[in-house]
Image (cartoon, helix red, strand yellow):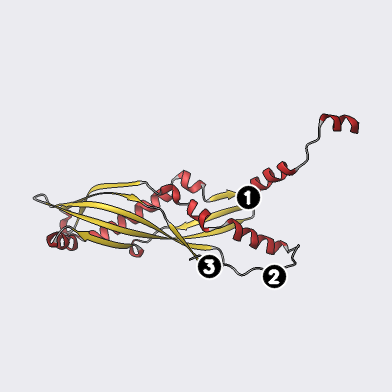
Amino acid sequence: MVEQAEPLASDTTRCTYEEFGALFFRAAVTPERILGAVDGIAGEPIDFGPMGVGPGRIAQVTAKGQIGEATATQLPGTPITYKLVIPVDLDFTINLQVEKERFHASVEVPLIVTAHATPDLRIVVDVTPPNPDELKLDLAADGLRAGLLGRIANVDGELRRFVAKYVARELEKPHIVATRNIDVGVSIDVAWAGMAPRRSIEDVASAR
């Protein structure tokens, strides 16, 4: 659940520039907008392999899956920071040359997302790349033998490293990065221009 910030003390009709800036950031950097900065990867497929795992890398892993929609929780303090969790579902197969074993993995990828202000009136959202050790992974095997093979081949660790690297790479694609850089100055110019009165031809003529 998102923690609500305490209201700033100010006059009912006026506030300081510092108060305005803090209020503006609270209104601008909402969970929905933060999620919008990474939701471009939701629904993207994951497809990798064959990849060698285990002793001698003899076993080959092939996996297919999909990235789900993230959830956000605001962390206390400043700068404004959220913890995002991105779910990933994977179905994969270990090929031991003579036989194949099938598994399913539910993975949760945690991200720390922080909003910063810049002197040129931008809001820049930084995303800390996921650490493989921080991923939560629920591994299910089809049968006792498959579970044993998973432990022998260290599938858990290999999947953590691959998924963390894959999500980090997706988050650095140009169209995703662009959503994390908001030019507030341009928005102000557009809003101000829209409010400015337009002088008609008759007004201009009468003023001469």
Q: Which amino acid type is marked by label 2?
A: Ala
**Residue 28 locus on image (x, y percent):** 59, 56
Could you say which is closer to the camera, residue 116 or residue 110?
Answer: 110
**Residue 108 locus on image (x, y percent):** 35, 60
Q: Which amino acid type is marked by label 3?
A: Glu
- In three-dimensional space, the C-alpha distance between marks 1 and 2, rounded to whole angstroms, equals 25 Å
- Pointer 2 residue: 9
Q: Is residue 49 left or right of residue 87?
A: left
Residue 149: image quadrant is bottom left
Task: Tell me the mark number nearer the camera, choosing from 3 and 1.
Answer: 3
Q: In the picture shown, does residue 43 fall above or below 205? A: below
- Pointer 1 residue: 184
**Residue 113 locus on image (x, y percent):** 48, 59
Which element is circle 1 on?
helix
Q: Which amino acid type is marked by label 1?
A: Val
- Pointer 3 residue: 3
